[in-house]
């Protein structure tokens, strides 16, 4: 019996497990996951714990980094639109967008002429409509080039779409989307000040962490989550305890998450150290 048997830890990737913000904004190389974070996760798993990535990235945008991340549980990708088994190389669960999303996306682009959108096909193709500076920044940190397409050319099924522009414009986009009669069919949230994401209703990190815990037979009182952005709120508030790096956005700080070391100073190592004391 290991001290972490029956414990699940799920963590966001960008700006939680490692800092990608500096690379995105400056064009610098994306750093590797730190040795301390890797060693901490290996220690946690050796003690019986289950570790899962819970990223807003689609599989195509995360898979090139997967070898850096010690994990022994299926991962949440696409902001909760899918659960993926990295060992078997297959999706276990999906909550996907339907055909109407392409038409509604075009209506939104028509209303906001400087807006770009990325559309994430579940099978590793990232389409981009009217790519802008933020699209190019995102390509840099994901190491995946987009395929430029009109909305009608974005092949189904889609896990999510992501609008890209300055924050003030995206606030207007969010208000527009939420005012539509079909708004209740979607989850609409920021994953960064310049990234506004849309997934199908029910496709959230919190919802998929709950499904993963049920699959693993782990009770909610032993589920812990870590994240820094608004798209992490659903899992931070569902978990027995949510952890947030000190670089988190104000909404995450306000949700009651326990603040730990920032993404430049081994966030996950700090969390595992705290769990080590809790399960002594």
Image (spheres, helix red, strand yellow):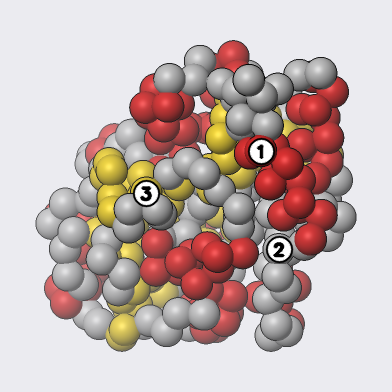
Report the quarter where the N terminus lies: top right
Callouts 2 and 3 close, C-beta under 8 Å: no
Mark in front: 3 vs 1: 1
Q: Earlier in the sequence, mark 1 or mark 2?
A: 2
Q: CA distance from mark 3 to mark 1?
A: 19 Å
Residue displayed at 60% across by 57% down: 69
Residue displayed at 83% across by 35% down: 273
Where is residue 30 shown, x and y percent of the image? 68, 76
Residue 140 in view in this figure: yes
* Image position of 66 with respect to 244: above or below: below
Give the crowd class for mark 3: few <14, some 14-19, many >=20 residues within 10 Å: some
Q: How many marks?
A: 3
Q: Earlier in the sequence, mark 2 or mark 3?
A: 2
Residue displayed at 50% across by 72% down: 64
Report the disc number at residue 85.
Answer: 3
Q: Nearer the viewer, residue 26 or 219?
A: 219
Where is residue 155 shown, x and y percent of the image? 17, 70
Write down the quadrant of residue 133 in the picture. Answer: bottom right
Residue receiving disc 2? 33
Give the crowd class for mark 2: few <14, some 14-19, many >=20 residues within 10 Å: some
Q: Earlier in the sequence, mark 3 or mark 1?
A: 1
Q: Nearer the viewer, residue 221 or 46?
A: 46
* Image position of 41 with respect to 67: above or below: above
Q: Secondary structure at mark 1?
A: helix
* Image position of 241 with respect to 110: above or below: above
Report the disc number at residue 46.
Answer: 1
């Amino acid at each position: 019996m290991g001290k972490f048997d029956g414990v699940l830890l799920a963590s966001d990737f960008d700006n939680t497990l490692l800092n990608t913000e500096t690379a995105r904004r400056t064009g610098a190389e994306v750093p590797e996951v730190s040795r301390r974070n890797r060693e901490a996760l290996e220690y946690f798993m050796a003690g019986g714990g289950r570790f899962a990535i819970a990223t807003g990235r689609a599989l195509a945008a995360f898979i090139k980094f997967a070898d850096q991340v010690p994990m022994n549980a299926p991962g949440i990708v696409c902001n909760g639109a899918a659960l993926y088994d990295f060992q078997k190389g297959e999706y276990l669960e999906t909550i996907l967008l339907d055909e109407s999303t392409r038409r509604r996306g075009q209506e939104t682009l028509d209303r906001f002429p400087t807006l770009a959108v990325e559309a994430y096909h579940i099978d590793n193709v990232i389409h981009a409509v009217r790519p802008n500076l933020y699209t190019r920044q995102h390509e840099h940190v994901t190491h995946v080039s987009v395929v430029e397409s009109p909305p009608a050319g974005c092949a189904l099924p889609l896990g999510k779409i992501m609008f890209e522009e300055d924050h003030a414009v995206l606030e207007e986009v969010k208000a527009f989307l939420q005012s539509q009669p079909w708004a209740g069919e979607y989850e609409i949230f920021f994953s960064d000040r310049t990234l506004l994401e849309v997934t199908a209703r029910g496709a959230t990190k919190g919802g998929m962490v709950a499904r993963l815990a049920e699959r693993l037979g782990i009770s909610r009182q032993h589920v812990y989550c870590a994240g820094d952005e608004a798209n992490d709120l659903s899992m931070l508030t569902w978990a027995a305890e949510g952890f947030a790096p000190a670089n988190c956005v104000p909404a995450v700080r306000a949700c009651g998450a326990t603040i730990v070391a920032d993404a430049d100073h081994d966030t996950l190592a700090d969390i595992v150290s705290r769990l080590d004391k809790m399960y002594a």
